[in-house]
Amino acid sequence: MLAGGMKYSDVREMNGERLYLQVIDGIGNVTEGSYPVTISPSGEDLYICEDPVIGTRPGFFGEEDKAEMYLALVYN
């Protein structure tokens, strides 16, 4: 889910050190981009940066003025 609880569907594909994302929200808006990523050696941490060419960020970055986001794998 995106910020605010909005549901979405997406396409994800790794191409070298870049992650291609296409996100479609519940009302049909499409956001896509290719983002530089770094994965920690453990494979549990992921850093995603905004697209440096066009400055777009994945929807889950929210409205904050961030250029990168850190995600961690959490086990339940």
Image (tube, helix red, strand yellow):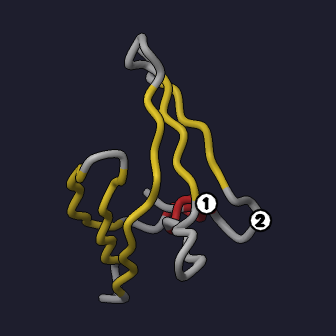
Q: Position of residue 42 (x, y in %)?
A: 42, 11
- Residue 65 visible in the shown view: yes
Q: Position of residue 12 (x, y in %)?
A: 23, 56
Does the residue at mark 1 contact the one at mark 2 (Cβ under 8 Å)?
Answer: yes
- Along the viewing direction, whichever of 68 and 9 lies nearer the viewer: 68
> Going 53% across and 60% down the picture, which residue do you hit?
60
**In the figure, 71 relative to 2: above or below?**
above
**In the figure, 57 relative to 54: above or below?**
above
The amino acid beneath tag 2 is Glu
> Residue reaching furthest right?
65
**In the figure, 54 relative to 15: above or below?**
below
Based on the displayed image, in which of its 4 quarters is residue 37 positioned? top left
- Residue 76 visible in the shown view: no
- Along the viewing direction, whichever of 27 and 31 lies nearer the viewer: 31
Based on the displayed image, in which of its 4 quarters is residue 24 positioned? bottom left
- Along the viewing direction, whichever of 54 and 65 lies nearer the viewer: 54
Q: Tag 2's secondary structure?
A: loop
Location of mark 2 (residue): 64
Q: Quadrant of the C terminus?
A: top left
Give the numbered dot on residue 23.
none
Disc 1 versus disc 2: distance between alpha carbons?
A: 7 Å
Within 10 Å of the Cα at label 1, are there few (<14), some (14-19), or many (20+) other Cα atoms? some
The amino acid beneath tag 1 is Phe
**In the figure, 35 relative to 37: above or below?**
below
> Going 77% across and 65% down the picture, which residue do you hit?
64
> Going 30% across and 88% down the picture, which residue do you hit?
28
Give the numbered dot on residue 61.
1
Within 10 Å of the Cα at label 2, are there few (<14), some (14-19), or many (20+) other Cα atoms? few
Q: Position of residue 65 (x, y in %)?
A: 79, 66
Left or right placement of residue 72 versus residue 75 in this view: right
Left or right placement of residue 52 versus residue 22 in this view: right
